[in-house]
């Protein structure tokens, strides 16, 4: 009898969630968060953690009830039993993953160009690095390979150690005057910042996907999600305080795309700048690989269930590689990262995941009796996620109307395509169910 496969421990499953969240987001959006929230940036990041924590509990209970690789797509489909709603959610998920790929690739390009060319980098160098990292992981995924679990866990350990060093040394040089007054950007700005940088918390939903591989999931799934979110939130808050306490407003404004590396320079010199830069490259690279791998397979599953065009389900015969999905996702992410500024990429990705997380919370609320969850948890999570989504649209519309219109336009196109696919599929089913003689008369 073959030996039973070893199950993932609580620590290992928690590491998956932490690695998924601290996968490049903090390196990419910290400067943006400080620029919008100002001195209240710690409250902003804590607020994002609250929404993530409530949503995480909903994911835990849904993951135990529906042990399926479809994740969010499956939960929404089970709750609302309407193909068009689940399909639209699937389109949003794919779009959100394109946004996160673009965000991570942009961060990789900004940090890499700064390390190679110097402060500010060069647009050409940034663009080449963006294209190179996306193309590199496209090739890796096309050959059916992915970074091994040990390498991924090693990357998580390295970046956490670097961030801990940064925070520990940073607190020694904090200037208290950098935090006064607390609401220097106004009382509403931190709320807008919560919504705009929420993509930094995307990733904890990876944990339920490992429910069948973890030891004692009834006990460990919820604990892993809660611990991962609490640890990540604490790291974000501490790192933000260290960065804000050591940088002037001008430095934050001028070096927004790679502010974490700039913040390390006063504490650790040029070595600190390089160290944070390397951590950013490792984090964003591993995040690109994991996101591309998972998003392509999500698109393939959705295509099989006719929620996406069937071309996305095409695979090579010798290897289960969804090459069409990989090529399309990589091409869209490359175009997005090269054509849009960081703020627009972050706004689109955050808006999309806030919308998805609101839908998942409301799915948990609808299925509360079946999955065994206190209704107040998904209700609070859904309301906060939906309110943050609306706040994000309001803020983006006030500061960049064209970007807000673009985001809503993408959603409208996705909805129209899904309605069209659902209608065509319904007509095909109705046609196939007709008697042969009736089909001939038609």
Image (cartoon, helix red, strand yellow):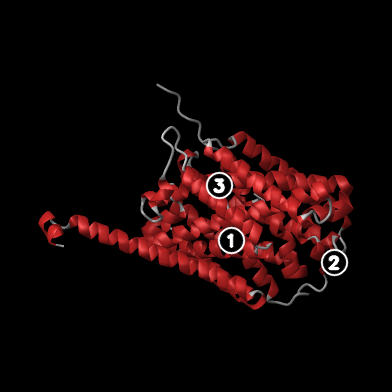
- Label 2: element kind: helix
- The 10 Å Cα crowd at callout 1, few under 14, some 14 to 19, many 20 or more, is many
Q: Is 400 in front, or is 122?
A: 122
Q: Position of residue 69 (x, y in %)?
A: 44, 47
First-in-chain label (2 vs 3): 2
Whole-angstrom CA distance, mark 1 to mark 3, is 15 Å
Q: Is 184 in front, or is 422?
A: 422
Q: Position of residue 185 (x, y in %)?
A: 75, 75
Check disc 3 and report the residue beneath it: 292
Q: Tell me: residue 154, above or below residue 121.
A: above
Q: Which residue is outermost to the left? A: 437
Res 349 label: 1
Name the image quarter holding residue 342. bottom right
Q: Position of residue 336 (x, y in %)?
A: 61, 58
Q: Position of residue 246 (x, y in %)?
A: 85, 59
Q: Are marks 2 and 1 in contact (CB under 8 Å)?
A: no
Instruction: Report if residue 72 is visible in the image.
Output: yes
Q: Are marks 2 and 3 in contact (CB under 8 Å)?
A: no
Q: Is 353 in front, or is 337?
A: 337
Res 250 label: 2
- The 10 Å Cα crowd at callout 2, few under 14, some 14 to 19, many 20 or more, is few
């Amino acid at each position: 009898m073959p030996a039973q496969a070893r199950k993932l421990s609580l620590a290992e499953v928690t590491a998956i969630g932490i690695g998924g969240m601290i996968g490049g987001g903090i390196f990419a959006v910290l400067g943006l968060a400080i620029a919008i929230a100002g001195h209240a940036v710690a409250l902003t990041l804590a607020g994002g953690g609250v929404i993530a924590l409530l949503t995480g509990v909903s994911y835990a209970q849904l993951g135990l009830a529906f042990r399926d690789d479809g994740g969010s797509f499956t939960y929404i489909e089970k709750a609302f039993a309407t193909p068009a709603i689940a399909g639209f959610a699937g389109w949003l998920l794919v779009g959100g993953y394109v946004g996160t790929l673009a965000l991570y690739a942009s961060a990789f390009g900004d940090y890499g160009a700064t390390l190679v060319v110097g402060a500010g980098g060069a647009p050409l160098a940034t663009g080449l690095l963006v294209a190179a990292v996306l193309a590199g992981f496209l090739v890796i995924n096309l050959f059916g390979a992915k970074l091994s679990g040990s390498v991924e866990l090693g990357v998580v350990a390295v970046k956490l150690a670097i961030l801990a060093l940064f925070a520990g040394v940073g607190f020694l040089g904090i200037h208290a005057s950098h935090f006064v007054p607390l609401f220097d950007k106004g009382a509403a700005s931190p709320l807008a910042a919560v919504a705009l940088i929420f993509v930094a918390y995307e990733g904890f939903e990876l944990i339920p996907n490992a429910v069948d591989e973890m030891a004692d999931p009834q006990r460990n799934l919820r604990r892993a999600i809660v611990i991962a979110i609490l640890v990540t939130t604490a790291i974000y808050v501490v790192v933000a305080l260290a960065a804000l306490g050591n940088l002037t407003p001008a430095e934050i404004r001028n070096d927004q795309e790679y502010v974490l590396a700039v913040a390390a320079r006063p504490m650790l010199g040029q070595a600190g700048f390089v160290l944070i830069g390397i951590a950013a490259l490792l984090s964003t690279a591993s995040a690109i690989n994991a996101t591309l791998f998972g998003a392509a397979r999500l698109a393939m599953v959705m295509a099989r269930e006719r929620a996406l065009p069937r071309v996305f389900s095409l695979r090579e015969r010798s290897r289960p590689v969804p090459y069409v999905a990989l090529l399309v996702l990589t091409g869209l992410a490359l175009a997005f990262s090269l054509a849009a500024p960081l703020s627009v990429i972050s706004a689109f990705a955050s808006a999309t995941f806030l919308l998805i997380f609101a839908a998942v919370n409301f799915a948990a609320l609808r299925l509360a009796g079946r999955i065994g969850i206190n209704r107040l948890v998904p209700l609070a999570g859904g309301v906060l996620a939906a309110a943050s989504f609306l706040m994000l649209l309001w803020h983006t519309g006030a500061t960049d109307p064209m970007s807000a219109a673009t985001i809503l336009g993408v959603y409208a196109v996705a909805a129209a395509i899904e309605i069209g696919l659902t209608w065509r599929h319904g007509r095909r089913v109705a046609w196939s169910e007709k008697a042969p003689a009736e089909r001939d008369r038609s």
